[in-house]
Structures are given as structure tokens and as C-alpha cells.
Image (spheres, grey):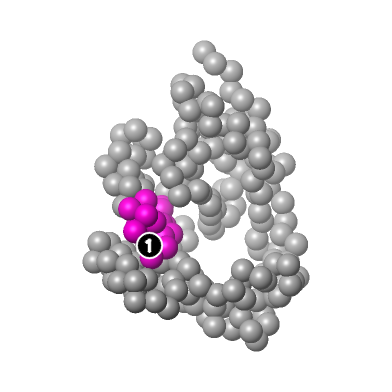
């Protein structure tokens, strides 16, 4: 029987990874962060190890019980790391851009969760709760792809779509807070999406 690896197999490893966030905001004390590291790339080689897809689920067992929500951000794939996240999750929100390749990737994730995850990952109750359209540019082609996403996924698509904005892309190096008047519009979009999230995935 293979020995569990040191990063994701032990609960104490997960506990020491969870850190307070550094934002100066009234809600900061209600949030924590477990930042990813380059060590995660080494887990790809373990995809063929028996039970490897359950390691994140085991590492989180008892660690996040006091949270209302644990959000796991994944790369747009259904490879090993994403499968570990899906095995540990209860709900799925797919983020896609309004272009052909991104929409095809979203369809593959959708099909994997609906058709394969219940058996392959032993997650019969895993459900897709929403589709978020991100980085939407004001072009006719993007609008056509956005409408295509709505046709494919129907009521799962959350509104509004997140518009592409250089202000957000430059916010980190410019130390631009979300309370700044220049980001009032995207902040309002995220607040609406947060309402959609809370409606689709009510806190236990």
C-alpha cells in the first residue's frame, strides 16, 4: 500500500496552511486563505497512485468544519488536481470566458461532473450550481458567444457577466482597493454574483 504524500494527506498540514488574509477591511477577520504553492505541481505525478484523488478530501476533514463556505479555485481542466478538488467539494461553479475554446472546456467540465464524477470520484450528490461568464469584451463576437453559453447552459448561467476591465488587471500593482470609486461598477457586479451564489448554494 503506497504511503500518503506529505503535502495533502495529513490534516495538520492543511491546518498550518490556512492563514488570515491581509486585507484592511471589516470583513477580513471572517475570511482565511490557503495559498497554493508550486509544490502542487508535483501532485500531478501521483494521479496513478491508488486513492490519490481523495487526498484533499482527507486533508480537509475536520479542518474547515467551522466555515460557512470553503471555496476551491481550480485550473480549467479535469486533470488530477481538479479531480481532487471535485472529490472534496459539494457544489461546482464553472467560470468561462466567451470564446469557443473556453466554452468547450466548460462543457467538458459540466459533462465530467454530471456523467463521470458520481462514479469515478464517489460524489453522487456533487452538483453544478452556476455558470459565470468572465472577461466579457464589448464585441459582437463575444456577445454571440455569451448568447451561446446561455443557450447551452440555460438557467445555470448567472447574471451579470463579468466585463473585462484593465482597472481590475492593474489593481494589484497599483494597490487600488475595491472601495476606490474607479472600481465601483465591477464591485457592483461581484455583489450581484455573490447574491446569486448565496441563493444557489445556501449556507448549511
Closer-to-camera residue (156/43): 43
Nearest to the observer: residue 109 or residue 17: 109
Q: Position of residue 47 (x, y in %)?
A: 48, 28
Q: Is residue 172 above or below residue 187?
A: above
- What stretch of residues is rendered in magenta? 91-106
In the image, residue 109 sits, relative to residue 51, either above or below, namely below
Q: Is residue 60 visible?
A: yes
Q: How many marks?
A: 1
Q: Residue at x 71, y 64 (%)?
A: 29
Residue at the image point whose x is 46% and y is 23% from the top: 48
Helix, strand or loop at mark 1:
loop
Q: Residue furthest bottom?
A: 181
What residue is shown at x 41% (from left), y 42% (from top)?
A: 78
At horizontal 24% and vertical 66% (from top left) the residue drawn is 151
| Classed neighbour count for the residue bearing mark 1: other residues with Cα under 10 Å, few (<14), some (14–19), many (≥20) | some
194 vs 109, nearest the viewer? 109
Q: Is residue 32 left or right of residue 198?
A: right
* Residue 128 visible at all: no
Q: List x then y, in percent, for residue 165.
A: 55, 75
The residue at the far top in this view is 1
Residue 164 location, x and y as percent?
51, 72
Q: Quadrant of residue 182?
A: bottom right
Seen in the image, is 40 located left or right of residue 138?
right
Instruction: Please tell me whether residue 102 belongs to the stretch shown in magenta.
Output: yes
Q: Is residue 34 magenta?
A: no
Residue 150, given in percent of the width and then of the height, sits at 28, 68
Give the residue number, with chain letter if any, for mark 1. Answer: 99
Amino acid at each position: 500500500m503506497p504511503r500518503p504524500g506529505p503535502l495533502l494527506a495529513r490534516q495538520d498540514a492543511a491546518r498550518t496552511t490556512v492563514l488570515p488574509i491581509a486585507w484592511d477591511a471589516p470583513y477580513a477577520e471572517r475570511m482565511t486563505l490557503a495559498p497554493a504553492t508550486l509544490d502542487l505541481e508535483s501532485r500531478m505525478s501521483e494521479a496513478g497512485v491508488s486513492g490519490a484523488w481523495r487526498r484533499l478530501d482527507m486533508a480537509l476533514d475536520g479542518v474547515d468544519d467551522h466555515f460557512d463556505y470553503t471555496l476551491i479555485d481550480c485550473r480549467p481542466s479535469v486533470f488530477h488536481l481538479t479531480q481532487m478538488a471535485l472529490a472534496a467539494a459539494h457544489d461546482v461553479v464553472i467560470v468561462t470566458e466567451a470564446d469557443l475554446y473556453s466554452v468547450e472546456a466548460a462543457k467538458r467540465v459540466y459533462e465530467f461532473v454530471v456523467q463521470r464524477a458520481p462514479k469515478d470520484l464517489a460524489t453522487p450528490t456533487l452538483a453544478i450550481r452556476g455558470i459565470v461568464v468572465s472577461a466579457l469584451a464589448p464585441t459582437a463576437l463575444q456577445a454571440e458567444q455569451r448568447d451561446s453559453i446561455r443557450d447551452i447552459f440555460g438557467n445555470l448561467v448567472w447574471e451579470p457577466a463579468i466585463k473585462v476591465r484593465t482597472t481590475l488587471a492593474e489593481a494589484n500593482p497599483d494597490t487600488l482597493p475595491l472601495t476606490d470609486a474607479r472600481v465601483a461598477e465591477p464591485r457592483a457586479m461581484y455583489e450581484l454574483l455573490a447574491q446569486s451564489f448565496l441563493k444557489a448554494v445556501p449556507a448549511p
